[in-house]
Amino acid sequence: MKNIVFTSQTMYRHPLDLNTGLLNITSNFDQQYATDERLGVIYSPEMTIFRLWAPAASKIELILFYTLYGDEAEHIMMEEFRPGTYEVEVTGNLDNKAYKFGIFYPDGTYIDTCDPYAFATTSNGARSVIVDLISTNPENWGARMPAFSATTDAIIYEANVRDFTISETSGAQNRGKFLGFIEQGTKSPNGLATGLDYLKELGITHVQLMPMYDFQTVDEENQTAKYNWGYDPQNYNVPEGSFATDARDPKTRIREMKQMIQGLHDAGIRVIMDVVYNHVYDTDTHPFEKVAPGYYFRRYSDGSLSDGTGVGNDTASENEMMKRYILDSVKYWAQEYHIDGFRFDLMGIHDIDTMNAVRETLDKIDPSIIILGEGWNLNTNLPEEKKAASINARQMLRIAHFNDAMRTAIKGSDMDGGFDTGFISGKPFMEQWIAINQQGGLYYPQDIAGYQQPDQIVQYVEAHDNHTLYDKLVINMPHDDERTRTRRHLLASSLAILAQGIPFIHAGQEFLRTKNGEENSYNLPDAINKMDWSRRDTKQKEVEYLKGLINLRKSNPLFRLQTTDEIAKHMEVLEADYYKIVWQLENDTDLFYVFFNGNGDPRYFKIEESDFEVLVHDCKVNIAQPRVWIDTDEIKVEGFSTTVLHKKK
């Protein structure tokens, strides 16, 4: 089907603008060139099909290397069997063979590129690799976990694969690796549980792992030379080699990532994958731009790149093949690796239709897969009404957004050095705003965010970005003693964990993690980013407090209501002023009073006279054997603390 002439137009067969070197993206471009054919490699022991979408090319060759790292290769011409889509079948078993594509352009240019759909690569993503994925499955690799109960039942713990165990204090053998994450029996310097055993003790339901696909700025063969979080995508469908015990073996990274996921699943913990489809590290060298120059990235009319991400480029999810790439990728991770959720970095860069299509695609696999993202309204070249931002949340049901509004009200803005204060650090008039946010979308001002249900709201006070909460409190309240700073910190965590919605905890938040005052540690060394498990030893009471709050939330469905109708029926805000927030939860069998005191002095509250169990008080949680206040009609809440009372009706 080469040299096709379209009767509906007179344009050149390959729509490359020779003046700009970019594709001429007309209004009907996708209709003419987009394909629903499966792309990448389709492997079998008898033969492998290679398929590439490259609408600007005049011809394409498959470069099939004889060895993974040798230069000798066979060059095989591919057939354009549909407009812009090329294919070739190669007989024989090509398992663990490396390949690239060579692209000839109408202007005489020739480039080679990796496969944007590659599932495996050599070290540093230099070449794509064909793999028999079945051979990468760990022993006893089975089906997905059963469907999760409800999104608002989730308690998410964000961690970085490397940071979690890279410190000697982790007690792990495979420090900084996929396998290190699931080692059992590891201990802190004082003999307390670390790693996987610690996560089980903590009671979280989901671990959200920062980028673990193949990213660009860490040298996989010299992994200590440079650190990076991984928000610099290179190969979206390939596990990061620096987290594997052998980055040069394409199958090792796949197998060990699956082993990590299997180990977490065996421990009852589900895995959310941090995905960064909104930009790439370098457009000029990325396969997207090489196979379809000017297509995958959002541009202005003059051809310049849109830069709402702040890193030089925004992907164009509104274009059919970029949208399809995102859908194919999440489907692959969910099916092949049994991923239980996806956290979309800078989700506001994407368009609403794409995010809803992601939800629909994953629903066919498992409707309980969680989708959450950063719904910031970013300055990208996309109409406001099409952005997948929090303001448009009403159009994206069952997709959650990080609730920066409550985060900021609790501790102050993270911008401009983090000097702004919040409810826990003395800023007035935050009480009602926090109380509204804690109601999980009920009565939420729609001109600020379009939340409709509590499963659309991620409640948090700390994440990998910006200062840790502890470091921010050092900046905000430098004259606090350690006891006061700790109480402010625990109050902040309780405000988020007990709110309606989806609670989210940054790894180490529970033991007051510090990064020595560094605000943005994305490329700083292990000394700054590592989880210091000796701090878990010295902050044991604080860990127990957060563990207790998690147990309290899990103990009664009133703390994790699934709809705003339920919240309206069962939750009532009683007071929200002068550094006090008080609300109650009530159904036919239980009554809870929840008090937050943002003042350093004790506060007293009148309640009906009765016998109440004291579940949370003075930075301690006791659910198993709570003390009872008999004939209580007034409750004392200590300074900078949370109190929770309960009685059976």
Image (cartoon, rainbow, N blue to C red):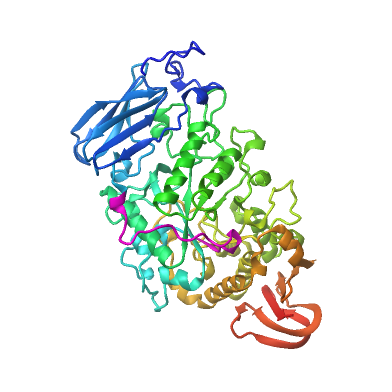
Residue at 63%, 45% (x, y): give it. 396
In this rendering, position of residue 438 left or right of residue 128? right
27 is higher (above) or lower (below) than 147: above
In this rendering, position of residue 202 left or right of residue 420? left
The magenta stretch is: 134-158
The quarter holding residue 504 reads: bottom right
The quarter holding residue 542 reads: bottom right
540 is higher (above) or lower (below) than 418: below
Residue at 69%, 61% (x, y): give it. 438
Which residue is more in the foreground, 267 or 167?
267
Report the quarter where the C terminus lies: bottom right
Magenta portion: prevailing SS class: loop
36 is higher (above) or lower (below) than 509: above
Residue furthest toward the top? 10
Q: Is residue 576 visible?
A: yes
Report the quarter where the N terminus lies: top left
In this rendering, position of residue 190 left or right of residue 302? left
Which residue is more in the foreground, 221 or 573?
573
Which residue is more in the foreground, 144 or 102?
144
Residue at 53%, 65% (x, y): give it. 509
Q: Is residue 221 visible?
A: no
Q: Position of residue 465 (x, y in %)?
A: 53, 54
Q: Is residue 627 magenta?
A: no
Q: Position of residue 476 (x, y in %)?
A: 63, 62
Q: Position of residue 66 (x, y in %)?
A: 19, 37
In this rendering, position of residue 331 left or right of residue 115? right
